[in-house]
Structure formats: C-alpha cells, structure tokens
Amino acid sequence: MKASLFIFLLTFTGFHSLKAQSSVDSLYLLQIEQTMDSLEQIQRVVKEVQKYEHRLLREEMAFHYNESAMLLRGLIQTGTNRSFIRHEGTFPKKDFEIQDYAVASLPLATTWALKALGVESRSTTRRMLTANAMALLLAGGSVEGLKYWSNETRPNGQDNHSFPSGHTALAFASATILEREYGHISPWITLGGYTAATATEWLRLRHNAHYVNDLFTGAGIGIVATNLAYFLTDQIYGTKGINPPRLYKGDIIRLGRFLERPTSFSLVAGSEITSKHFHLDGIDWRTSSIYTSGFEYTCFFDSHWAADLTARLATTQVKAEDISLTTSPAFTLSQYHLNGGVRYSTTLGLNTRLALRAFGGECYTDPTHKWNAEVGTGLSFEVITTKNYVTGFSADYMHSFSDLFPNRCVISSYWKILL
C-alpha cells in the first residue's frame, strides 16, 4: 500500500512539473515571436528611411532652382527702369565700398569659420574649396562681363559699372554657400546668411551706388552661379567627400508642425509696383522701382487661422521731372510700414501651403514726416525644404490713405523659420 502511494505521488509530481515546463516554454516562444515581429518592423522602417535618405542625396546633388527667379525679376526691372535711369539727376556720392564688402562677405567668412572650428559641413575641405572657388569665379565673371557690356552709369555718377551689383552678387553667393554647407544644422543659419545678403542690397541702394534692378540682377547671379558651381562640383566628385543628408526625429516634428500649426518668423524681401510719378512741394517727381525688405511674425491658432505682424522698409530713388526747379534733383525716399492682419492657410500637399490674408496698419514717409493708414490683401505660396526652413512667394495689394503712392502691389520672396 505504501509503495503504491509513493508511485502515485511520484507520477503526479512529474506530470505537474512537465505541465509547468510546457507553460514556461510556450511563454518564452511567444516572447521570441513578438521580438521577431518587432525586429521585422524596425527593419522595414530602416529600409524606408534609407530609401528616403538616398532620395535626399539625389536631390541635394541635383541643380537647385531656389530663388533663381530673382535673376528674372532683375532683368525685367532693368527694362521697366530704363526711362528713370536715363533721366537727368545725380545722387550724392557716399564712399562705403569697404564696409559694404564686409557685410557682403560675412556669410562666406562664417562658413569657413565654422569649418575651421570643426563643425560638420556638407562637403570635405577640398570639395568645399572647389565649389566655393567655382561659385565666386562664375558670379564674378558674369558680373564683370555684364558691367563691361552695359556700361551703365551709377546713380552717383562715380563710374560706368552700375549694372549689375557686384556686392550683391557676392553677398547672395556667400549666403547660398552658407546655406548649402550648414543649413542642415539649423534654419537660423540660413536666415542669418540671407539677412546679411539682404542688408547688402539695402546698403548699396542707400549709398547711391546702384539702381534697384542692379541689386536683383546681382542677387540672382550670385544664387544661380553658386547652385551651378555646386552642381558641377557634385558631377566631378560624385558621392566622394560629401556628407549625405540624414533624416532625424526633429525633421519629422518640423514637418508635422508645418502641416498643423506653422507659427513662424520670416525674412521678407521684394519690390513694390506703383505709380512712378508723384507731386510734392510744388515739384513733379519720378521714381525708380521700389525695394522693400523686413520681418514678419505669424502666430497660428489652429491648422488654418493665424495672426500676422509685419515690419517692413520700402526704399526708392527719386529724380525731379524738371531739375531746373530744385537744388536737390535726386534723393532716396523711404517708407516704414507697420501692419497687422489675419491669415487663412491650407495645405496643398505634404510640404506646401497656400494662404490668403487681409491686413491693415500705418505707413510713415520720410519726406512728409507723416503717418498714414493703409489696408491690404494678398496671397502666398510656400514650401518646406529638406533643410527644414520654409521658402515662399507672396503678392499683396495695398491701399494707403495718402497722396503719395496710394495704390501698390508688393511682390516678395521670404525665408521662414518654424517656431
């Protein structure tokens, strides 16, 4: 009897142990299966990221058309500005050549300073030197060739090298180099470079060294020459010596922000189209094209509605219709615009937006020393780039409650940072 009981207990214990072991093995196998599924999902994600980064590299090595339209804008204004340029009237001379060159070359100096500090750039030193040298040679050669061909007298009468602006070509070539090499680190680097280039345009205009069309043409030459230089360099070196673009978590976050609530800070630069004649102090005046630049802050409340705040400076050159009636036959006129408004924006795809806006504010004019109310409306189209800043184009119609330029159309390009 005792022997039978012992055999029963032994058999029962063994069966129970086997059952427990079977349960443990099943749980372990389930964990392995789940881990393998997770690994397969990760591998699929990695493959998709690699495919996307390969596409980014192809796009980076292709020719970039960003802001190439600035060259077309300058050439068009060269034709429309012709009668003003040929009209009598000489502006005062202001010698700021060295200071203006310092501002124009600041983005290029920043590029090489970052390189010297060991900050990872798009290109190795040799490749970067090749692209930079080629960009400056193409821009400089184009500018000098056009200066010789056009033989255009400067506004201040200093020489016949007005068209196009060499300072502006250098400035925008430098800004484009900085954007190509270090724009991937932060969009603030890109904005800083183009701010220095835009400041160069304004300084050359205020220093009476160029007409507005000279500035836009020079800027377009600088941008196109630099993008062409990088394209040719990439054809020469291939993928050797280039740091390929990477997809980071922050890129996904910025894209989501662009699609949902793209609150932003922007640099705006462009031109105004308005009447080229006005009457002031008993004298009839004619004007050149109007150059404008400034900054804009846009705060989104949801994915569509936003409020805008804009501070903008518009500058134009003025000549008296009859120079015998005035001792100052030519001068520079500036207007300061402060506007606020509302914007409705909607997405057109994964990386584009279209917006309509209405705004109002005040405009201060230098010659009259008066503030005048103004209202306007307009539209804009923008694209988020692979460098994680937004570039766009806007067209606005404005009405000012003033006898001086009461109606105008503002055509602008902008570089925007998502906040």
Image (cartoon, rainbow, N blue to C red):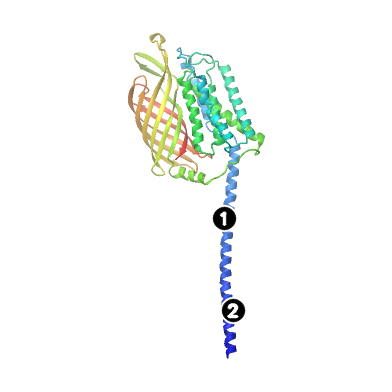
Asked whether residue 66 is in view, the answer is: yes
* Left or right of 47 on screen, residue 294: left
Which amino acid type corresponds to the residue marked 1 in the rendered image?
Gln
Amino acid type, callout 2: Gly
- Work out how far the residue at label 1 is from the one at label 2, CA to CA, in angstroms: 41 Å
Mark 1 or 2 closer to N-term?
2
* Numbered disc in front, either 1 or 2: 2
Is residue 47 depicted above or below 274 in this figure?
A: below
Label 1: which secondary element: helix
Whole-percent x and y of residue 168?
Answer: 52, 24
The residue that appears at 50% across and 23% down in the rendered structure is 215
Residue at the extreme bottom of the image, as rendered: 1
The quadrant the N terminus occupies is bottom right
Q: x, y (%) of residue 149?
A: 58, 17
Percent of width and height locating residue 80: 48, 21
Residue that mark 1 sits on = 41
